[in-house]
Image (cartoon, helix red, strand yellow):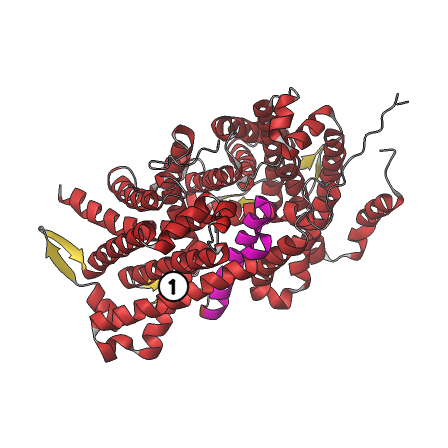
Amino acid sequence: MELFFTQLANGLAIGSIYALIALGYTMVYGILKLINFAHGDLFGIGAYLGLTLLTCFGLIGKLGFVTGIIVLAVMIFILVGIIGIMLEKIAYKPLRNSDRLSAVVSALGASIFLQNALMLIYGARIRAYPANVLEITTKTIVIFGLNLSVARVIIFVVSIVLMIVLYLFVQKTKMGVAIRAVAIDHEASKLMGINVNTIITIVFLIGPALGGIAGLMVGLCYGQVSFMIGWSYGLKAFIAAILGGIGNIPGAMVGGILLGVVEALGAAYLSLAWKDAIAFFILILILIVKPTGILGERVAEKI
Amino acid sequence: MKNMKKKDILFCIVLLILPIFLNNYWTDVMVNIGFYAILGLSLNIILGYCGLFHMGHAAFYAIGAYTAAILNTKFNVPIFALVPLGGLFAGLLAAIIAKPIIHLRGDYLLIVTIGIVEIVRITLVNNIFGLTNGANGIFGIDRPNLFGFVIKTRTHFYYLIFAFAAITVYLFYQLENSRFGRALFYIKEDEVAAEGSGIDIAKYKLLAFVIGAVWAGMLGVIYSSNMLIICPESFNFWESVILFTIVLIGGSGNIKGVILGAFLIVGLPEIFRELATARMLVFGAAMIIMMIFRPEGILPVKRKIYKYENFE
């Protein structure tokens, strides 16, 4: 039984990472009907930026662990958000009125570009996070009789807080209403006095910024990053977004956590070697059985 | 091929005499370009003619290559006998996989096909039924033997691939201009209108998928005998992305465009070898720029104009 709960906790942690990344996919898809293939790489950029900022500024040493991490997270939020906005302006905005395939290819190109930029800057080898940080994050604490690393607890708590904030932002604020309106109909939103370009910019700020923070947390939890990290997590997170119902913000949260848990339990009870295939089997299954996803009922379009 | 233009014939003649002037390295590059051109053409049926976003083509290629490797190393079946068999297995797999997913719209299909190529790779790595030898791959595959003549030097392979490519271009050209080809183009342009005109969309899409897969499978057999060693990493997702871009950059739906795409995407990086590490960066940037300024590809497909024969 202990294995079950340990794997459940692992699944919840990794699942909340998937959920945070999936939010970026689902928000962009909701607004532009575009799969932002480069989103996974923005997540990777977040992980690498965390590494750079930690080693260059020695934030943890100067500010202490908690403040240091918060400052770091804010910096990454802003930086990755800016990169996200630039990505949209350069690679997607010129293609807004052309057919979807062009935009998908452009997104793939952006992904290849960012991934290789990371490789050229940081090298192809796996890089480790600074030891003084890992010392703290890999400590274990006992909760309900389970040994959990500090990083996993941070991941879970931070993700849940971020998701609640995002949910409130989208549901309760004027800007959030505007985002939802643009997702439904660009033209009608324009007529209602919403600046669609601003909304798209904001979505490309929030989505990648959340992904960047997820990247930082993965770095803190596993202590290492490689330039390929964006693809493996990005693809899983995208599956999570489809699982929950793409374009649906609560769906991405549910889908991410569900996928994380199923994967962790599958790895423990079915087969570790097939762990990576589980997500793809789930993907194919959900697309055959219920293509709109668990929570996605809004889409009336035939898929 | 009555309507072959002079420059096409010239191109063929140049290709025919080219190996005389090339050293082993560049002949190998040309063989590679040939492989990718044929693979691109097979994907072109699915992506270019029919408009299905299929990004898992490496999976079918892998099935062909592994069929050849397993049957050749375990039972000594000659390579040329395996060519149709590799195609058959790839086609069967394509039919089984495609059946439930073929109706999915654009980017959903794209994601599922990415899933398929990953599942195939993971299956190969996990040494399924003890046949695929895991991540190490299979080695010791025979060279193709044509009635006692062993195809082994680079130049031999060059001509083998050249012949395969010529047959491919000829057949696919016929296909393009057949009733079947026209139906695929129609589905790509307007699915609803095509269905309204009595085209069985599901059937045609499935057929396009299977034909593309069979061709990739057959080529996979030749690939395995060219490399002599194959491993799952040769068929990863990036291979599929490269094929996808060859078709789109060259001009999807256009045979000449796809061949040009293969030359550009496989050949150009060889010329700029000093930029080796940065070439994928340039590649990604080029994809974005291309889609912004020329989304239809370098050689876009020309719309066919059909003349009324009895029009008064």
Residue A144, given in percent of the width and then of the height, sits at 9, 50
User: Which segment is the magenta one?
Assistant: A92-121
Q: Look at the magenta stretch and give its main secondary structure.
A: helix
Count of numbered tags:
1
| Relative depth, front residue between A187 and B115 | A187
| Relative depth, front residue between B304 and B153 | B304
Q: Is residue B137 left or right of residue A56?
A: right
Q: Residue furthest front?
A: A192
Residue B280, given in percent of the width and then of the height, sits at 57, 60
Residue B279 appears in which quarter of the rendering?
bottom right
Q: Secondary structure at mark 1?
A: helix
Chain to which mark 1 belongs: A
Residue B32, given in percent of the width and then of the height, sits at 66, 49
Q: Residue furthest right?
A: B312
The disc labelled 1 sits on which kind of residue? Gly
Q: Is residue B229 left or right of residue A64?
A: right
Residue under pointer 1: A46
Q: Tell me the quadrant of the picture where the N terminus of chain B can be found.
A: top right
Q: Tell me the quadrant of the picture where the C terminus of chain B can be found.
A: top right
Question: Is A123 situated above or below A166?
Answer: below
